[in-house]
Amino acid sequence: MKVLFANPPWKSQEGRYGVRAGSRWPFTMPAAGPDSLPYIPFPFFLAYGAALLEARSDAQVLAVDAIAEGLDEAGYARRVAAFAPDVILAESSQASLSCDIRHAVDARKALPGVVYILAGPQASTTPEAILGSHPEVAYCLVGEYEWTMLDLVTAMERPGFTPSGIPGLAWRDDQGAPRVNPRRLPGDLSELPWPAYRHFPMHKYKDYFCGIAGPMVNMVASRGCPHRCSFCLWPEVMYGGHTYRVRDVADVADEMAFLVDTYGFRTVYFDDDTFNLGKQRILRLTEEIRLRGIGVDLAVMARADAMDEDMLRALRGVGLVAVKYGLESASPDILERCGKGLDLEVAKSNIRFTKSLGIKVHLTFTVGLPGETRQTIEDSIRLALELDTESIQVSLATPFPGTPLHEYVRSRGYLSSDREDLFDGSHQCVARTEELSCREIEEGFKAFQAAWKEHRQAKERASAQDQPVHPLL
Protein backbone atom coordinates (compact mmCIF):
# COMPACT_ATOMS: atom_id res chain seq x y z
CA MET A 1 0.00 0.00 0.00
CA LYS A 2 1.27 3.46 -0.91
CA VAL A 3 0.44 6.22 1.57
CA LEU A 4 0.93 9.95 1.00
CA PHE A 5 1.15 12.41 3.90
CA ALA A 6 0.24 15.79 2.42
CA ASN A 7 0.25 19.45 3.29
CA PRO A 8 -1.47 20.77 0.12
CA PRO A 9 -1.13 24.34 -1.23
CA TRP A 10 -3.42 26.96 0.30
CA LYS A 11 -4.34 30.17 -1.47
CA SER A 12 -7.29 32.21 -0.17
CA GLN A 13 -10.03 33.85 -2.21
CA GLU A 14 -8.26 37.18 -1.71
CA GLY A 15 -5.01 35.81 -3.14
CA ARG A 16 -3.25 35.44 0.23
CA TYR A 17 -1.14 32.35 0.92
CA GLY A 18 -1.63 30.31 4.06
CA VAL A 19 0.20 28.04 6.48
CA ARG A 20 -1.69 25.15 7.99
CA ALA A 21 0.15 21.99 9.12
CA GLY A 22 2.52 22.78 11.97
CA SER A 23 0.85 26.08 12.83
CA ARG A 24 -1.14 26.34 16.05
CA TRP A 25 -2.84 29.35 14.50
CA PRO A 26 -3.52 28.57 10.80
CA PHE A 27 -3.51 31.85 8.91
CA THR A 28 -2.89 33.56 5.59
CA MET A 29 -0.47 36.32 4.65
CA PRO A 30 0.29 38.42 1.60
CA ALA A 31 3.07 36.97 -0.54
CA ALA A 32 4.29 37.27 -4.10
CA GLY A 33 3.73 33.57 -4.66
CA PRO A 34 3.64 30.18 -2.95
CA ASP A 35 7.43 30.10 -2.83
CA SER A 36 7.87 33.42 -1.03
CA LEU A 37 6.25 32.91 2.38
CA PRO A 38 8.27 34.49 5.22
CA TYR A 39 7.13 31.91 7.79
CA ILE A 40 6.75 28.14 7.29
CA PRO A 41 6.41 25.90 10.36
CA PHE A 42 7.51 22.28 10.41
CA PRO A 43 4.49 19.89 10.19
CA PHE A 44 5.19 17.74 13.24
CA PHE A 45 2.05 15.58 13.14
CA LEU A 46 2.60 14.71 9.48
CA ALA A 47 6.28 13.94 10.08
CA TYR A 48 5.69 11.83 13.18
CA GLY A 49 2.81 10.03 11.44
CA ALA A 50 4.93 9.20 8.41
CA ALA A 51 7.75 7.93 10.62
CA LEU A 52 5.43 5.73 12.68
CA LEU A 53 3.83 4.20 9.60
CA GLU A 54 7.23 3.43 8.10
CA ALA A 55 8.42 1.86 11.35
CA ARG A 56 5.34 -0.22 12.15
CA SER A 57 3.80 -1.20 8.79
CA ASP A 58 4.68 -2.42 5.32
CA ALA A 59 3.31 0.71 3.68
CA GLN A 60 5.37 2.67 1.17
CA VAL A 61 5.36 6.22 2.51
CA LEU A 62 5.89 9.60 0.88
CA ALA A 63 5.36 13.10 2.27
CA VAL A 64 4.71 16.19 0.15
CA ASP A 65 4.71 19.52 1.95
CA ALA A 66 3.57 21.73 -0.92
CA ILE A 67 3.64 24.86 1.23
CA ALA A 68 7.27 24.38 2.25
CA GLU A 69 8.26 23.39 -1.28
CA GLY A 70 6.49 26.43 -2.75
CA LEU A 71 4.35 24.28 -5.06
CA ASP A 72 1.29 25.72 -6.74
CA GLU A 73 -1.77 23.50 -7.28
CA ALA A 74 -0.55 22.19 -10.62
CA GLY A 75 2.87 21.32 -9.22
CA TYR A 76 1.33 19.61 -6.23
CA ALA A 77 -1.06 17.63 -8.46
CA ARG A 78 1.89 16.38 -10.51
CA ARG A 79 3.69 15.17 -7.37
CA VAL A 80 0.58 13.31 -6.21
CA ALA A 81 0.00 11.73 -9.62
CA ALA A 82 3.63 10.62 -9.90
CA PHE A 83 3.41 8.72 -6.61
CA ALA A 84 -0.09 7.35 -7.36
CA PRO A 85 -0.96 6.66 -3.72
CA ASP A 86 -3.62 4.29 -2.47
CA VAL A 87 -4.22 6.51 0.55
CA ILE A 88 -3.79 10.26 1.04
CA LEU A 89 -3.78 11.88 4.47
CA ALA A 90 -4.02 15.69 4.34
CA GLU A 91 -4.24 18.23 7.14
CA SER A 92 -7.18 20.61 7.43
CA SER A 93 -7.99 23.84 9.22
CA GLN A 94 -10.99 26.11 9.65
CA ALA A 95 -9.79 28.85 7.33
CA SER A 96 -8.50 26.47 4.65
CA LEU A 97 -11.41 23.99 4.63
CA SER A 98 -12.89 24.94 1.26
CA CYS A 99 -9.42 24.65 -0.26
CA ASP A 100 -8.83 21.34 1.54
CA ILE A 101 -12.06 19.89 0.15
CA ARG A 102 -11.16 21.04 -3.36
CA HIS A 103 -7.89 19.11 -3.12
CA ALA A 104 -9.85 16.03 -2.06
CA VAL A 105 -12.18 16.38 -5.05
CA ASP A 106 -9.25 16.83 -7.44
CA ALA A 107 -7.40 13.83 -6.00
CA ARG A 108 -10.44 11.61 -6.40
CA LYS A 109 -10.86 12.71 -10.02
CA ALA A 110 -7.23 11.97 -10.82
CA LEU A 111 -7.07 8.77 -8.74
CA PRO A 112 -10.63 7.38 -8.50
CA GLY A 113 -9.66 4.56 -6.15
CA VAL A 114 -7.71 6.65 -3.65
CA VAL A 115 -8.83 6.70 -0.01
CA TYR A 116 -8.77 10.36 1.03
CA ILE A 117 -8.39 11.18 4.73
CA LEU A 118 -8.52 14.54 6.50
CA ALA A 119 -6.77 15.19 9.81
CA GLY A 120 -5.88 18.28 11.80
CA PRO A 121 -7.98 20.88 13.64
CA GLN A 122 -11.01 21.09 11.35
CA ALA A 123 -11.28 17.35 10.81
CA SER A 124 -11.12 17.00 14.59
CA THR A 125 -13.78 19.64 15.27
CA THR A 126 -16.43 18.86 12.64
CA PRO A 127 -15.83 15.30 11.39
CA GLU A 128 -19.53 14.47 11.12
CA ALA A 129 -20.25 17.61 9.07
CA ILE A 130 -17.32 16.92 6.75
CA LEU A 131 -18.26 13.28 6.17
CA GLY A 132 -21.92 14.18 5.84
CA SER A 133 -21.31 16.79 3.13
CA HIS A 134 -18.22 15.62 1.27
CA PRO A 135 -18.33 12.07 -0.11
CA GLU A 136 -14.82 12.42 -1.51
CA VAL A 137 -13.46 12.31 2.07
CA ALA A 138 -13.47 8.72 3.30
CA TYR A 139 -12.33 9.27 6.90
CA CYS A 140 -11.50 11.99 9.40
CA LEU A 141 -8.90 11.52 12.13
CA VAL A 142 -9.70 13.23 15.42
CA GLY A 143 -6.94 14.81 17.49
CA GLU A 144 -3.38 13.50 17.57
CA TYR A 145 -3.54 11.17 14.63
CA GLU A 146 -0.25 9.29 14.34
CA TRP A 147 -1.47 6.08 16.05
CA THR A 148 -4.96 6.34 14.56
CA MET A 149 -3.45 6.48 11.07
CA LEU A 150 -1.27 3.45 11.80
CA ASP A 151 -4.25 1.46 13.10
CA LEU A 152 -6.37 2.44 10.10
CA VAL A 153 -3.80 1.61 7.43
CA THR A 154 -2.86 -1.74 8.96
CA ALA A 155 -6.54 -2.65 9.48
CA MET A 156 -7.37 -1.77 5.86
CA GLU A 157 -4.94 -4.42 4.69
CA ARG A 158 -6.64 -7.21 6.66
CA PRO A 159 -9.68 -9.23 5.50
CA GLY A 160 -12.95 -8.23 7.12
CA PHE A 161 -11.79 -4.70 7.87
CA THR A 162 -14.17 -2.68 10.03
CA PRO A 163 -13.43 0.87 11.22
CA SER A 164 -15.70 0.78 14.26
CA GLY A 165 -13.03 -0.25 16.76
CA ILE A 166 -10.32 2.29 15.92
CA PRO A 167 -10.11 5.10 18.51
CA GLY A 168 -9.97 8.60 17.07
CA LEU A 169 -11.55 7.64 13.74
CA ALA A 170 -14.62 9.17 12.08
CA TRP A 171 -16.18 7.04 9.33
CA ARG A 172 -19.48 6.15 7.59
CA ASP A 173 -21.63 3.15 8.36
CA ASP A 174 -23.29 0.92 5.74
CA GLN A 175 -26.10 3.45 5.34
CA GLY A 176 -23.63 6.26 4.74
CA ALA A 177 -24.27 7.92 8.11
CA PRO A 178 -21.22 9.51 9.81
CA ARG A 179 -19.95 7.79 12.95
CA VAL A 180 -17.28 9.07 15.33
CA ASN A 181 -15.41 6.57 17.50
CA PRO A 182 -14.31 7.48 21.05
CA ARG A 183 -11.34 9.78 21.14
CA ARG A 184 -7.91 8.21 21.44
CA LEU A 185 -6.19 8.83 24.78
CA PRO A 186 -2.96 10.86 24.69
CA GLY A 187 -0.02 8.61 23.88
CA ASP A 188 3.45 8.17 25.33
CA LEU A 189 5.82 10.36 23.31
CA SER A 190 8.69 7.93 23.91
CA GLU A 191 6.92 5.39 21.69
CA LEU A 192 7.05 7.68 18.66
CA PRO A 193 10.10 7.47 16.39
CA TRP A 194 11.82 10.68 15.40
CA PRO A 195 10.00 12.57 12.63
CA ALA A 196 10.56 11.25 9.11
CA TYR A 197 12.88 14.14 8.28
CA ARG A 198 14.17 12.58 5.04
CA HIS A 199 10.74 13.03 3.43
CA PHE A 200 10.59 16.77 4.08
CA PRO A 201 12.44 19.78 2.58
CA MET A 202 14.30 20.47 5.80
CA HIS A 203 16.00 23.67 4.70
CA LYS A 204 12.72 25.25 3.54
CA TYR A 205 11.15 25.66 6.99
CA LYS A 206 11.59 29.07 8.54
CA ASP A 207 10.72 30.96 11.67
CA TYR A 208 13.52 33.50 11.82
CA PHE A 209 12.22 35.57 14.73
CA CYS A 210 14.70 37.85 16.47
CA GLY A 211 17.13 37.36 13.60
CA ILE A 212 18.17 33.83 14.57
CA ALA A 213 20.85 32.30 12.37
CA GLY A 214 19.94 30.06 9.48
CA PRO A 215 19.55 27.40 8.48
CA MET A 216 17.26 26.65 11.41
CA VAL A 217 15.22 23.60 12.40
CA ASN A 218 12.14 23.07 14.56
CA MET A 219 12.10 20.45 17.31
CA VAL A 220 9.83 19.57 20.22
CA ALA A 221 10.81 18.24 23.64
CA SER A 222 7.23 18.05 24.94
CA ARG A 223 3.63 18.10 23.80
CA GLY A 224 0.64 19.83 25.35
CA CYS A 225 0.05 22.55 27.92
CA PRO A 226 -1.60 22.44 31.36
CA HIS A 227 -2.81 26.03 31.10
CA ARG A 228 -6.30 26.83 29.88
CA CYS A 229 -6.14 29.71 27.42
CA SER A 230 -9.63 29.85 25.92
CA PHE A 231 -8.34 30.85 22.48
CA CYS A 232 -5.68 28.15 22.10
CA LEU A 233 -6.54 25.67 19.37
CA TRP A 234 -4.26 22.69 19.81
CA PRO A 235 -4.82 21.84 23.53
CA GLU A 236 -8.58 21.84 23.12
CA VAL A 237 -8.89 20.36 19.64
CA MET A 238 -5.77 18.34 18.86
CA TYR A 239 -4.84 17.12 22.36
CA GLY A 240 -8.39 16.95 23.72
CA GLY A 241 -7.38 18.39 27.06
CA HIS A 242 -4.57 19.96 29.05
CA THR A 243 -2.13 17.10 29.49
CA TYR A 244 1.58 17.83 29.40
CA ARG A 245 3.87 15.07 28.20
CA VAL A 246 7.63 15.23 27.94
CA ARG A 247 10.29 13.33 26.05
CA ASP A 248 13.39 11.78 27.54
CA VAL A 249 16.01 14.51 27.59
CA ALA A 250 18.82 12.23 26.38
CA ASP A 251 16.73 11.27 23.34
CA VAL A 252 16.02 14.95 22.66
CA ALA A 253 19.73 15.76 22.78
CA ASP A 254 20.52 12.80 20.50
CA GLU A 255 17.99 14.09 17.97
CA MET A 256 19.52 17.56 18.15
CA ALA A 257 22.96 16.14 17.44
CA PHE A 258 21.60 14.10 14.52
CA LEU A 259 19.92 17.14 12.93
CA VAL A 260 22.97 19.35 13.29
CA ASP A 261 25.38 16.69 11.99
CA THR A 262 23.12 15.58 9.12
CA TYR A 263 21.78 18.88 7.84
CA GLY A 264 24.20 21.49 9.14
CA PHE A 265 21.65 23.55 11.05
CA ARG A 266 22.95 26.59 12.91
CA THR A 267 19.89 27.11 15.14
CA VAL A 268 17.59 24.62 16.86
CA TYR A 269 14.25 26.15 17.78
CA PHE A 270 12.15 24.26 20.33
CA ASP A 271 8.66 25.07 19.12
CA ASP A 272 6.93 23.30 22.03
CA ASP A 273 3.50 24.43 23.16
CA THR A 274 5.23 25.43 26.41
CA PHE A 275 8.90 24.45 26.49
CA ASN A 276 9.93 25.52 29.98
CA LEU A 277 7.69 23.53 32.35
CA GLY A 278 9.66 21.42 34.81
CA LYS A 279 12.80 23.17 35.95
CA GLN A 280 14.82 20.03 36.70
CA ARG A 281 14.00 18.57 33.28
CA ILE A 282 15.22 21.74 31.56
CA LEU A 283 18.43 21.72 33.60
CA ARG A 284 18.99 18.04 32.71
CA LEU A 285 18.43 18.82 29.04
CA THR A 286 21.04 21.59 29.12
CA GLU A 287 23.50 19.14 30.67
CA GLU A 288 22.81 16.55 27.95
CA ILE A 289 23.41 19.22 25.30
CA ARG A 290 26.65 20.20 26.99
CA LEU A 291 27.86 16.58 27.21
CA ARG A 292 27.37 16.11 23.47
CA GLY A 293 29.15 19.36 22.61
CA ILE A 294 26.34 20.54 20.36
CA GLY A 295 27.68 23.93 19.41
CA VAL A 296 24.69 25.66 17.81
CA ASP A 297 22.31 28.42 18.80
CA LEU A 298 19.06 27.60 20.60
CA ALA A 299 15.67 29.31 20.59
CA VAL A 300 12.56 28.33 22.54
CA MET A 301 8.83 29.02 22.91
CA ALA A 302 8.25 29.56 26.63
CA ARG A 303 5.83 30.83 29.25
CA ALA A 304 7.14 34.05 30.75
CA ASP A 305 6.00 33.54 34.35
CA ALA A 306 7.24 29.92 34.40
CA MET A 307 10.82 30.90 33.56
CA ASP A 308 13.42 31.66 36.22
CA GLU A 309 17.01 32.86 36.43
CA ASP A 310 18.54 29.40 36.89
CA MET A 311 16.88 28.02 33.75
CA LEU A 312 17.79 31.09 31.73
CA ARG A 313 21.44 30.98 32.81
CA ALA A 314 21.67 27.25 32.06
CA LEU A 315 20.02 27.65 28.65
CA ARG A 316 22.18 30.65 27.83
CA GLY A 317 25.20 28.53 28.69
CA VAL A 318 24.35 26.04 25.93
CA GLY A 319 23.54 28.59 23.28
CA LEU A 320 20.12 30.16 23.93
CA VAL A 321 19.88 33.31 21.80
CA ALA A 322 16.12 33.96 21.49
CA VAL A 323 12.85 33.30 23.34
CA LYS A 324 9.22 33.67 22.35
CA TYR A 325 6.98 34.64 25.26
CA GLY A 326 3.20 34.89 24.98
CA LEU A 327 1.82 37.85 26.94
CA GLU A 328 -1.38 38.50 24.93
CA SER A 329 -2.52 41.49 27.02
CA ALA A 330 -1.43 44.01 29.66
CA SER A 331 -4.79 43.58 31.39
CA PRO A 332 -4.84 41.13 34.34
CA ASP A 333 -8.61 40.97 33.97
CA ILE A 334 -8.39 39.87 30.32
CA LEU A 335 -5.69 37.34 31.16
CA GLU A 336 -7.87 35.89 33.90
CA ARG A 337 -11.02 35.83 31.79
CA CYS A 338 -9.34 34.05 28.89
CA GLY A 339 -7.87 31.40 31.19
CA LYS A 340 -4.22 32.31 30.73
CA GLY A 341 -3.79 33.45 34.32
CA LEU A 342 -0.38 34.95 33.62
CA ASP A 343 1.38 36.68 36.51
CA LEU A 344 2.32 39.86 34.67
CA GLU A 345 4.76 41.15 37.26
CA VAL A 346 6.73 37.89 37.28
CA ALA A 347 6.55 37.79 33.49
CA LYS A 348 7.90 41.33 33.13
CA SER A 349 10.73 40.60 35.57
CA ASN A 350 11.71 37.46 33.65
CA ILE A 351 11.59 39.28 30.33
CA ARG A 352 13.94 41.94 31.64
CA PHE A 353 16.29 39.30 33.04
CA THR A 354 16.20 37.41 29.73
CA LYS A 355 17.27 40.57 27.94
CA SER A 356 20.00 41.24 30.52
CA LEU A 357 21.67 37.96 29.55
CA GLY A 358 21.85 39.07 25.93
CA ILE A 359 18.97 36.79 24.89
CA LYS A 360 16.63 38.38 22.38
CA VAL A 361 12.92 38.34 23.15
CA HIS A 362 9.87 38.09 20.89
CA LEU A 363 6.49 38.82 22.51
CA THR A 364 3.04 37.83 21.28
CA PHE A 365 -0.08 39.93 21.88
CA THR A 366 -3.71 39.25 20.99
CA VAL A 367 -6.24 42.01 20.39
CA GLY A 368 -9.96 41.39 20.86
CA LEU A 369 -10.12 38.90 23.73
CA PRO A 370 -13.16 39.07 26.05
CA GLY A 371 -13.03 42.27 28.08
CA GLU A 372 -11.00 44.19 25.51
CA THR A 373 -11.57 47.96 25.46
CA ARG A 374 -9.80 50.91 23.90
CA GLN A 375 -8.01 51.42 27.20
CA THR A 376 -6.76 47.83 27.46
CA ILE A 377 -5.41 48.01 23.90
CA GLU A 378 -3.58 51.24 24.80
CA ASP A 379 -2.23 49.54 27.93
CA SER A 380 -0.93 46.61 25.89
CA ILE A 381 0.75 48.96 23.41
CA ARG A 382 2.35 50.83 26.28
CA LEU A 383 3.60 47.56 27.82
CA ALA A 384 5.10 46.41 24.52
CA LEU A 385 7.00 49.67 24.09
CA GLU A 386 8.07 49.69 27.73
CA LEU A 387 9.53 46.17 27.51
CA ASP A 388 11.26 47.15 24.27
CA THR A 389 11.98 43.62 23.05
CA GLU A 390 13.57 42.65 19.77
CA SER A 391 10.22 41.97 18.10
CA ILE A 392 6.53 41.39 18.72
CA GLN A 393 3.61 39.67 17.03
CA VAL A 394 0.09 41.09 17.21
CA SER A 395 -2.84 38.84 16.31
CA LEU A 396 -6.59 39.24 16.21
CA ALA A 397 -8.42 37.03 18.71
CA THR A 398 -9.91 34.25 16.60
CA PRO A 399 -12.59 32.01 18.10
CA PHE A 400 -11.70 28.73 16.42
CA PRO A 401 -14.48 26.14 16.62
CA GLY A 402 -13.77 23.67 19.39
CA THR A 403 -12.25 26.25 21.73
CA PRO A 404 -13.93 27.78 24.80
CA LEU A 405 -13.54 31.19 23.16
CA HIS A 406 -15.74 30.08 20.27
CA GLU A 407 -18.45 28.88 22.61
CA TYR A 408 -18.22 32.13 24.59
CA VAL A 409 -18.66 34.47 21.61
CA ARG A 410 -21.21 32.25 19.87
CA SER A 411 -23.44 31.98 22.93
CA ARG A 412 -23.45 35.77 23.34
CA GLY A 413 -24.09 36.58 19.70
CA TYR A 414 -20.70 38.26 19.27
CA LEU A 415 -19.72 36.43 16.07
CA SER A 416 -19.85 38.73 13.04
CA SER A 417 -19.38 35.94 10.51
CA ASP A 418 -19.28 32.17 10.27
CA ARG A 419 -17.38 32.19 6.97
CA GLU A 420 -14.71 29.57 7.49
CA ASP A 421 -12.05 31.34 5.44
CA LEU A 422 -12.14 34.45 7.66
CA PHE A 423 -10.98 32.57 10.77
CA ASP A 424 -7.27 33.14 10.36
CA GLY A 425 -6.53 35.90 12.87
CA SER A 426 -4.21 37.84 10.63
CA HIS A 427 -6.26 40.57 9.00
CA GLN A 428 -10.00 40.48 9.78
CA CYS A 429 -11.90 40.39 13.07
CA VAL A 430 -14.80 37.92 13.30
CA ALA A 431 -15.97 38.46 16.90
CA ARG A 432 -16.73 41.62 18.85
CA THR A 433 -16.27 42.13 22.59
CA GLU A 434 -18.63 43.60 25.14
CA GLU A 435 -17.45 47.15 24.40
CA LEU A 436 -15.79 47.04 20.98
CA SER A 437 -17.17 46.28 17.54
CA CYS A 438 -15.16 44.27 15.04
CA ARG A 439 -14.24 47.48 13.24
CA GLU A 440 -12.96 49.04 16.47
CA ILE A 441 -10.94 45.91 17.26
CA GLU A 442 -9.37 46.03 13.80
CA GLU A 443 -8.54 49.69 14.34
CA GLY A 444 -6.85 48.83 17.64
CA PHE A 445 -4.98 45.97 15.95
CA LYS A 446 -3.64 48.32 13.26
CA ALA A 447 -2.80 51.00 15.82
CA PHE A 448 -0.79 48.45 17.81
CA GLN A 449 1.18 47.44 14.74
CA ALA A 450 1.74 51.06 13.73
CA ALA A 451 2.92 52.10 17.21
CA TRP A 452 5.41 49.24 17.31
CA LYS A 453 6.72 50.04 13.84
CA GLU A 454 7.19 53.68 14.77
CA HIS A 455 8.93 52.66 18.00
CA ARG A 456 11.40 50.42 16.19
CA GLN A 457 12.12 53.06 13.56
CA ALA A 458 12.71 55.68 16.25
CA LYS A 459 15.04 53.32 18.05
CA GLU A 460 16.99 52.63 14.88
CA ARG A 461 17.30 56.37 14.18
CA ALA A 462 18.44 57.04 17.73
CA SER A 463 20.94 54.22 17.57
CA ALA A 464 22.35 55.61 14.35
CA GLN A 465 22.68 59.04 15.95
CA ASP A 466 23.82 57.60 19.31
CA GLN A 467 20.91 59.31 21.08
CA PRO A 468 18.50 57.99 23.71
CA VAL A 469 15.05 56.79 22.63
CA HIS A 470 12.13 58.79 23.97
CA PRO A 471 8.78 57.10 24.78
CA LEU A 472 6.18 57.37 22.04
CA LEU A 473 3.03 57.13 24.13
Image (cartoon, helix red, strand yellow):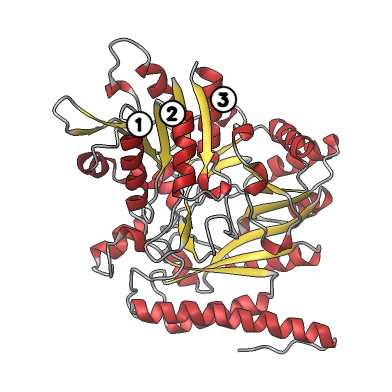
Q: Residues within 10 Å of mark 1 (few under 14, many from 20)?
A: some
**What amino acid type is highlighted by mark number 3?**
Glu
Query: Rounded to the nearest whole Å, what is the CA distance between mark 2 and mark 3?
Result: 30 Å
Q: Position of residue 152 (x, y in %)?
A: 38, 23
Q: Residues within 10 Å of mark 3 (few under 14, many from 20)?
A: few
Disc ID at residue 191 = 3
On the question of residue 381 being in view, the answer is yes
Q: Residues within 10 Å of mark 2 (few under 14, many from 20)?
A: some
Q: Position of residue 202 (x, y in %)?
A: 65, 42
Mark 3 residue element: helix
Disc ID at residue 111 = 1
Disc ID at residue 152 = none
Query: Rounded to the nearest whole Å, what is the CA distance between mark 2 and mark 1?
Result: 7 Å
Q: Are marks 2 and 3 in contact (CB under 8 Å)?
A: no
Q: Position of residue 11 (x, y in %)?
A: 43, 57
Which callout, 2 or 3, points at the residue further toward the start of the chain? 2
Judge whether 308 appears above or below 243 on screen.
Answer: below
**What amino acid type is highlighted by mark number 1?**
Leu
Judge whether 422 appears above or below 129 on screen.
Answer: below
> Which residue is under mark 2?
84
Q: Say which of 141 and 279 sits in front.
A: 141
Judge whether 151 appears above or below 460 on screen.
Answer: above
Which callout, 2 or 1, points at the residue further toward the start of the chain? 2
Q: Are marks 2 and 1 in contact (CB under 8 Å)?
A: yes
Q: Quadrant of residue 114?
A: top left
Left or right of 347 in this view: 24? left
**What amino acid type is highlighted by mark number 2?**
Ala
